[in-house]
Amino acid sequence: MASFWEKVSVNGLEMDLYASVPSSGSGFSAPYPAVLVAQHATGVDAFIQDICDRLAAEGYAAVAPNLYHRVTDPALLNEQPRPRPAALLSDPDIVADVNATVEWLLGHDAVLSDRIGVTGFCMGGRVAWLAAAVNPHFAAVVPYYGGNLMASWGAGETPPFALANDINCPMLFHFGGIDENPSPADMDTLDAELTRLGKAHRFYSYPGADHAFMNPDGGRYQQAAAETSWPRTLEFFAEHLKG
């Protein structure tokens, strides 16, 4: 596995992204299927980088764009408590960042252009849903406990939930059983809407697991949920991106 930072241009601005690809001795050969990893509220930190590295170890080119690149005051990102992502981000900017990352992948000869997936954690789960709705290049989407889907952010005019009909790739969504955002009621609402629209999806809820159950450095990590959901994610991506 080899990892590095890249810079891409987004509407004249520079955005960093973390990239991880299989190593030459891993048994995988280019071109690779790819996965865009959408950050959680604390950014493209060690957890998100580790997710990229774990995907690279499975044969994917994984990239995580820094969605906070427009925040000009670094102190905002270090405040405690940290401002909510909705106060720092705007849906049109998120869409632009996702699209620029996808264009970077499409232009890379080490990437299979028709086998790109997207996953994300916490706010990144929301980003993953939104990304799958607005960008036609995604072949699979895996949100982890993505909340706030019924609200738009910043200059956004349409909540991600209302864009469900535009999602044209299969979805696997992981929920914490005691999470409040998204709550079990939210899960039922999302499930009902995707079912009504005839969208292929699988939902899993993990008993006793709270929000952010995947992050071992957070206070709500749950080993059972993390160790059950991740193989399901890998199996899902293998089915739709490698099969």
Image (cartoon, rainbow, N blue to C red):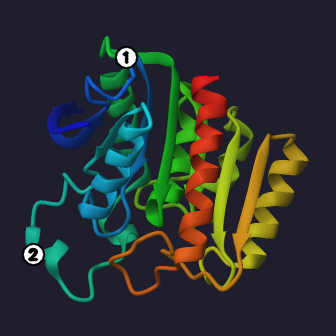
Could you tell me residue 185's position as x and y percent?
Answer: 77, 77
Task: Please name the residue shown 40% across and 47% down the image.
Answer: 37
Q: Is residue 90 above or below residue 30?
A: below
- Cα separation, mark 2 vs mark 1, equals 42 Å
Q: Quadrant of the N terminus?
A: top left
**Percent position of residue 9, x then y:** 19, 31
Quadrant location of residue 12?
top left
Q: Which residue is depicted at the point 52% across and 58% down?
A: 125
Please tell me in which quadrant of the rendered image residue 112 appears.
top left
| Residue 13 seen in the figure | no
Task: Return the residue at label 2.
Answer: 75
140 or 21: nearer the eye? 21
**Residue in front for this viewpoint, 82 or 155:** 82
Report whether residue 15 is seen. yes
Across and down, in percent, residue 110 comes to 32, 16
- Position of 132 compared to 24: left or right? right
Q: Kindly identify the amino acid type of the residue bearing the numbered disc 2.
A: Ala
- The count of marks equals 2
Label 1 element class:
loop
Q: Which residue is mark 1?
A: 29
